[in-house]
C-alpha cells in the first residue's frame, strides 16, 4: 500500500510540473501592427504584420469581408491557417490572440473568429491552431458554448498530436 501511494504521488507531481510549464501569453492586433498591403479593387483586401511570441509573427489577412491568419516562423517560413476555408461566412478576427507556450516556445494559438451566420446573428468561434517550425495548421474549431475557452485550451494543449483539419467540423 505504501509503494502504491508513493507511485501515485510521483505521478501527481510529474503531471503538475508538466502542466505548470504550459502558460498563456496574449498578444493583440493593434496600432503597433504594420500594414503591408491595402487594396480596395477589385475586392477589399489587406495584410497586416503583427508581433507574436518566441520569434513567431502573425499576418492578419483579409479579403471579401473574411479574415484569416498566417503564421511566420522565426526562420521566416509562412504557414497559411486558412480560416476562411473552414468557416465560410463573412468573418472578423478579434484583436486578442492567445498563445499556449511551453518553456517560452509557442505550440498553439487560439483566435476568436466572429462570423455572420445565415440567420443574421453573429456567432463567435474559437479557432485552435498548432504552431511549429515545420507545420502550423488549424486543429480544432470550438463552437459557441458554455466553457468554450476551457475547451479551446484543452484542444490547444494537445495540439501537437492532432491532425490538421481539412474541412469544417459540423456546427
Image (cartoon, rainbow, N blue to C red):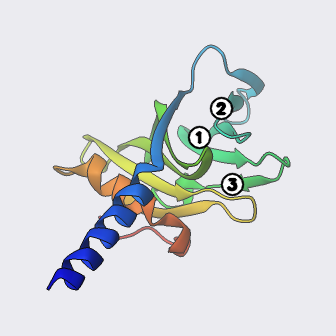
> Where does the image place residue 27, in percent across and percent down from the top left?
54, 29
Say above or below: 59 vs 38. Answer: below
- In the drawing, does residue 75 fall left or right of residue 51? right
> Where does the image place residue 43, in percent across and percent down from the top left?
67, 36
| Dot 1 or dot 3, earlier in sequence | 1
Real-space CA distance between mark 2 and mark 3, rounded to the nearest whole angstrom: 19 Å
Q: Which of 17 and 42 is in front in this view?
A: 17
Real-space CA distance between mark 2 and mark 1, rounded to the nearest whole angstrom: 6 Å
Label number found at residue 80: 3
Using the rendered image of the protein, determine whether residue 163 is visible from the camera's viewpoint. yes
Say above or below: 75 vs 54. Answer: below
The residue depicted at 74 percent of the width and 39 percent of the height is 55
Real-space CA distance between mark 1 and mark 3, rounded to the nearest whole angstrom: 17 Å
Using the rendered image of the protein, determine whether residue 143 is visible from the camera's viewpoint. no
Residue 67 position by quadrant:
top right
Estimate how packed mark 3 is, as few (under 14), some (14 to 19) or many (20 or more) residues with alpha carbons within 10 Å. Answer: some
Q: Which of 89 and 128 is in front in this view?
A: 128
Image quarter hosting the N terminus: bottom left
Contact flag, marks 2 and 1 (Cβ < 8 Å): yes
- In the drawing, does residue 77 fall left or right of residue 50? right
The secondary structure type at the circle numbered 1 is loop
Label number found at residue 64: 1
Label number found at residue 44: 2
> Where does the image place residue 130, in percent across and percent down from the top left?
56, 60
Amino acid at each position: 500500500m505504501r509503494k502504491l501511494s508513493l507511485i501515485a504521488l510521483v505521478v501527481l507531481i510529474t503531471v503538475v510540473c508538466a502542466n505548470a510549464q504550459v502558460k498563456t501569453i496574449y498578444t493583440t492586433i493593434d496600432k503597433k501592427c504594420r500594414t503591408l498591403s491595402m487594396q480596395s479593387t477589385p475586392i477589399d483586401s489587406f495584410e497586416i504584420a503583427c508581433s507574436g511570441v518566441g520569434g513567431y509573427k502573425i499576418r492578419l489577412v483579409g479579403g471579401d469581408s473574411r479574415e484569416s491568419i498566417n503564421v511566420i516562423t522565426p526562420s521566416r517560413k509562412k504557414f497559411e491557417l486558412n480560416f476562411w476555408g473552414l468557416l465560410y461566412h463573412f468573418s472578423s478576427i478579434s484583436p486578442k490572440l492567445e498563445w499556449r507556450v511551453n518553456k517560452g516556445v509557442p505550440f498553439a494559438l487560439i483566435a476568436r473568429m466572429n462570423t455572420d451566420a445565415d440567420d443574421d446573428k453573429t456567432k463567435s468561434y474559437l479557432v485552435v491552431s498548432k504552431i511549429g517550425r515545420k507545420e502550423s495548421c488549424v486543429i480544432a474549431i470550438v463552437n459557441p458554448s458554455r466553457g468554450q475557452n476551457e475547451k479551446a485550451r484543452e484542444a490547444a494543449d494537445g495540439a501537437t498530436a492532432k491532425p490538421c483539419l481539412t474541412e469544417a467540423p459540423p456546427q
